[in-house]
Amino acid sequence: MSPPTVHSTLSRAIGVLASTAGLLLVVNGCSADSGASSDEAAAQGDGSGERVDVDGSDGLAWGTGKDGVVLVHGASFDAASWRPQAEQFADAGVSVFAVEDTSRDSLEAAVDQLRQEQGAKQVALLGASAGGASVIEAAGSGPRFYDQLVLLSPAGGDVQSLDGAPTFFIYSKDESLADSIEEQIDQAPGDDNKVLAIDGSAHAQGIFKTDAAQQVTDAILERVTGGS
């Protein structure tokens, strides 16, 4: 076999380079399209779970709707810990805001955020464990700025300071705070209170890791929306 000529070798090299360049263009084109699709999807999203600053106290916002809920986390949690529940609430048409700071000022700012920016007409405060105690303290320390309370295994708080606003107590029958929570239930003023005691010993947001998670989520939604 005769050795390849310079011309034929050069032709093959040019062909390889052309093929490689074409492949790179295809890959880059796919990458560019993927990036554009992601950017477009983000631009078209509803902002669910975006971080919002309200009067210097930030939190996470989901959804829009006439019914709203402020989520107040427990001591070892943060606003993002509510994400699975917040997404379900938002999917059901509820305006949601999860606070980082659990002070009264922060909760009032969150309620304003829901009413002014997310379309809520009525707002519930949902506090878990230490967050439940924070909700009770905030609710009992001045004029009412909310419509109802949902207390998930509240870790203390003087419920007698509340003004009789509708309150929904949720806890586990065998959790360590069960006796204390049952005392709070007995002492809570108002004639539109509700109690859901589930089996097991899970506490507060830990309940959402049990088989009762959906039952509790549905019960909260029904209460917050008035069954609508």
Image (spheres, rainbow, N blue to C red):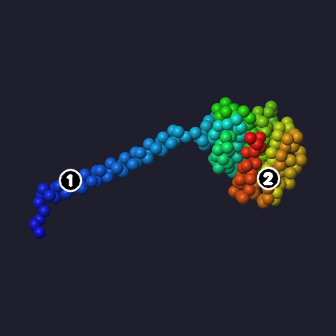
Viewer-nearest residue: 107 or 47: 47
Q: Give percent across and percent down for residue 130.
A: 75, 47
**Observer-nearest residue: 110 or 225?**
225
The correct choice, above or below, for 162 with respect to 80 in the image is above
State how far apart marks 1 and 2 are (Cα). 74 Å
- Residue 14 is labelled as 1
Image spot of residue 124 (x, y percent): 75, 39
Q: Nearer the viewer, mark 1 or mark 2?
A: 1
Q: Relative to the observer, which residue lies in front, 225 or 208?
A: 225
Residue 68: give x, y in percent of width and height. Answer: 71, 38
Mark 1 surroundings: few (<14), some (14-19) or many (≥20) residues within 10 A: few
Residue 102 place in picture, x, y as percent: 71, 41
Q: Quadrant of residue 122?
A: top right
Graded by Cα atoms within 10 Å as few (under 14), some (14 to 19) or many (20 or more), the crowding at tag 2 reads: many
Dot 2 falls on a residue whose secondary structure is strand
Q: Amino acid at mark 1?
A: Ile
Considering the image in quadrants, where does the C terminus appear? Answer: top right
Q: Residue at x 20, y 56 (%)?
A: 13
Q: Decide: marks 1, 2 in contact (CB < 8 A)?
A: no
Decide: is 176 above or below 63: below
> Which comes before the other along the chain, label 1 or label 2?
1
Quarter of the rendering occupied by the N terminus: bottom left
Q: Is residue 43 left or right of residue 216?
A: left
Residue name at image x 24 percent, y 56 percent: 16
Residue lying at the far left in this picture: please name it. 2
Q: In terms of image quadrants, where is residue 101?
A: top right
Q: Is residue 209 left or right of residue 7?
A: right
At x 51%, y 42%, the residue is 41
Residue under label 2: 171
Q: Name the amino acid type tagged 2.
A: Tyr
Residue at horizontal 17%, vertical 55%?
11
